[in-house]
Amino acid sequence: MINFLPIAIGLRYARAKRSNHFISFISFSSIAGLALGVMVLITVLSVMNGFDRELRQRILGMVPHATLWGTPVLDDWRATAKLVEKMPNVIGVAPHIQAQVMFQSGDSVHGAILNGINPNMEKKVSIIDNNMASGSLSALDDTSFGIVLGAQLAKMLGVAVGDKVTAILPKANVSIAGVAPVLKRFTVVGTFEVGAELDSSLAYINIKDAAKLKRYNDDDAEALRISFDDLFVAPVRIWDIARDIPGQNRVSDWTRTHGNLFQAIQMEKTMIGLLLLLIVAVAAFNIVSTLVMVVTDKRNDIAILRTMGLTSAQVMWVFIVQGMFIGMLGTLIGVISGVALALNVSDLIAAVQTLFNVEFLNSDVYFINYLPSQLEWSDVRLIVVSAFIMTVAATIYPAWRASKVEPAEALRYE
């Protein structure tokens, strides 16, 4: 049977006004420190989650989750695409031809990756159609040798929709006049902008134009770009697909091209979380000093309670409950303020930038120009549990000291 007397006394001690104002100040600082640590931890982890989300939606939304490559082209890619679409976890398949080229316009020359795509099928595996800054992706079907450039690449080349740009391929044309590089003029029919470095390194043309450029048959495709319902299954599922597809095919997935960036954000989130958790730990163990002073101040009360029949274990619970009340109050305040800040930090930072005319995130340096935030309740639960465990651990030593108070010794001079 649970004895609620120690709990009632502990809560009474926690709520009572103290004659010693210094103890009250230490209790307040413990609550404030714990609340501040929890609030900052929730906010920072939410911001890291926001960066992780933007990475997935922007960068990993533009690059394929996985790619099945032919040698050099796929045999009957249409039949292969139908077969792949029926496989587990696959939500989209699109043909692809790729080439590394140099683009020239006037005196400007910049390297980029040229992607030959089917505009209608590409929508299944890429977010490019949702991020067109000018023109349209469907214009690639209507314009012979039309091209869609990344907004930053178009800016560096100094071109806009309707302008011409020359692609220089790393191949050579041999004729009686000598050896000359392969050149092709394209008409810019659109630009896309995802706010990442991909804006300066990618360009798209119709797959039929790409086949002509690389001297394939009109209906050839070098690879199939595959999108999955969960990008984390891509590294495993693409190998299963390769084994089920006839022929000697090569595979690649997003972890080979952008896995390091994703892992870096995950590692930063873990390290920052651990460092900020130390703030919570310091605030939680500040409860130790609070309770030690309370035990010293309440020696006479402890002695009287012991003479009235409270056991050592019950005395321990009195001060454990008091410490837990302080810790839970600080944690509750921190969770409420942290959740509120995490849900509004993007708007707050935007308001500060507008008010003081400053820019914390430059889109020329980072892949976004605002502070993203995504609150994960699993993070909140982990923080609350961690704070609770540290709070309980912080109460054990002062509570043990209180249980060792001898009534006769404490009341000798009273």
Image: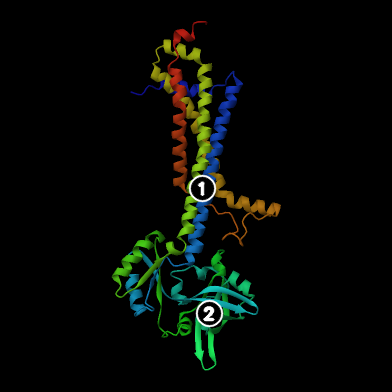
Whole-percent x, y for residue 258 in the image: 47, 62
Identify the residue at image location x=55%, y=80%: 167
Q: Is disc 1 surrounded by few (<14), some (14 to 19) or many (20+) residues within 10 Å?
A: many
Between residues 271 and 284, which one lies in front from this camera angle? 271
Question: Which residue in the protein does label 1 denote?
Answer: 45
Between residues 95 and 216, which one lies in front from this camera angle? 216
The numbered mark at residue 139 is 2
Callout in the foreground (2, 1): 1
Choose top left, top right, bottom left or bottom right for residue 364: bottom right
Whole-percent x, y for residue 331 in the image: 50, 36
Q: Is residue 178 above or below residue 169?
A: below
| Residue 204 in sight in this render | yes
Residues tagged 2 and 1 counted as in contact (Cβ below 8 A): no
Q: Residue farthest to the bottom? A: 176
Horizontal arrangement in the rendering, residue 161 relative to residue 10 (left or right): right
Identify the residue at image location x=38%, y=21%: 3
Whole-percent x, y for residue 409 in the image: 47, 8
Count how many numbered circles sit on residues in the image: 2
Q: Is disc 2 surrounded by few (<14), some (14 to 19) or many (20+) residues within 10 Å?
A: some
Q: Is residue 143 above or below residue 372?
A: below
Q: Mark 1: which secondary structure?
A: helix
On-image quarter of the N terminus: top left
* Residue type, numbered disc 2: Ala
Q: Is residue 203 above or below residue 397?
A: below
Identify the residue at image location x=54%, y=78%: 147
Whole-percent x, y for residue 14 in the image: 51, 24
In space, the residues marked 2 and 1 are separated at their CA atoms by 42 Å
| Residue 159 in sight in this render | no
Q: Residue farthest to the right? A: 356
* Residue type, numbered disc 1: Leu
